[in-house]
Amino acid sequence: MPRIQWDESMATGVDTVDAQHRQLIAWLNDLMEAISRGRARSEIQGLLAKLGAYSTFHFGHEEECMVRYKCPAAEANMLAHKDFVATLADLTDAFERDGATAHLVVRVEVEMLRWLTTHIRRTDTLLLPCVKAAQS
Ligand SMILES: [Fe+2]
């Protein structure tokens, strides 16, 4: 299965933020690999825990960067992060209620893919011109 690779279409201009996005991509690749090997259900609890911790430190850091570089998307970015945190809470509730079902595994995969292709590519990258403007 082809692995998803970080590329310039996801660049934010801030190395630490990009490194954290690469981490998210690595976890998504791990999940897709686990699905193809039929062992995703045993890994989903650990992944949900990692995503919970990630959303705290990564979103906080990225939001600070958007404020620091006066990015016009700062507010929209914060709202999108709140949505993702709520989605993650739903997924965690579903895990606590029903356990590691195949349906939950697919929901987590879909949400991570959606986050990558919509949020990171469309919102987080609005930081790039602001960082470039600050450096020029
Ligand atoms: Fe973001």
Image (spheres, rainbow, N blue to C red):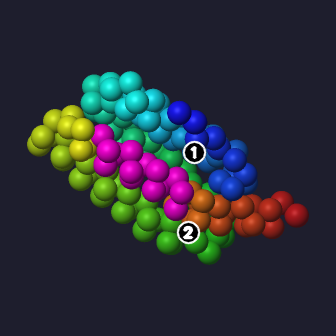
Please name which of the two marks, 1 or 2, marks the residue nearer to the observer.
1
| Label 1 SS | helix
Q: As drawn, is 87 to the left or to the right of 101?
A: right
| Label 2 SS | helix
Residue at 62% x, 75% y is 72
User: For this rendering, which residue is in front, 111 or 80?
Assistant: 111
> Does the Cβ of the disc 1 residue fall within 8 Å of ligand 1?
no
Q: Position of residue 6 (x, y in %)?
A: 65, 44
Q: Quadrant of the C terminus?
A: bottom right
Circle 2 residue? 74
Q: State the separation of the CA atoms marked 1 and 2.
A: 17 Å
Q: Work out whether 136 lies above or below 51.
A: below
Residue at 53% x, 33% y is 1
Q: Position of residue 84 (x, y in %)?
A: 38, 57
> Does the Cβ of the disc 2 residue fall within 8 Å of ligand 1?
no
Q: Main secondary structure of the magenta part?
A: helix
* Amino acid type at mark 2: Ala
Residue at 60% x, 59% y is 121
Q: Residues within 10 Å of mark 1 (few under 14, many from 20)?
A: many
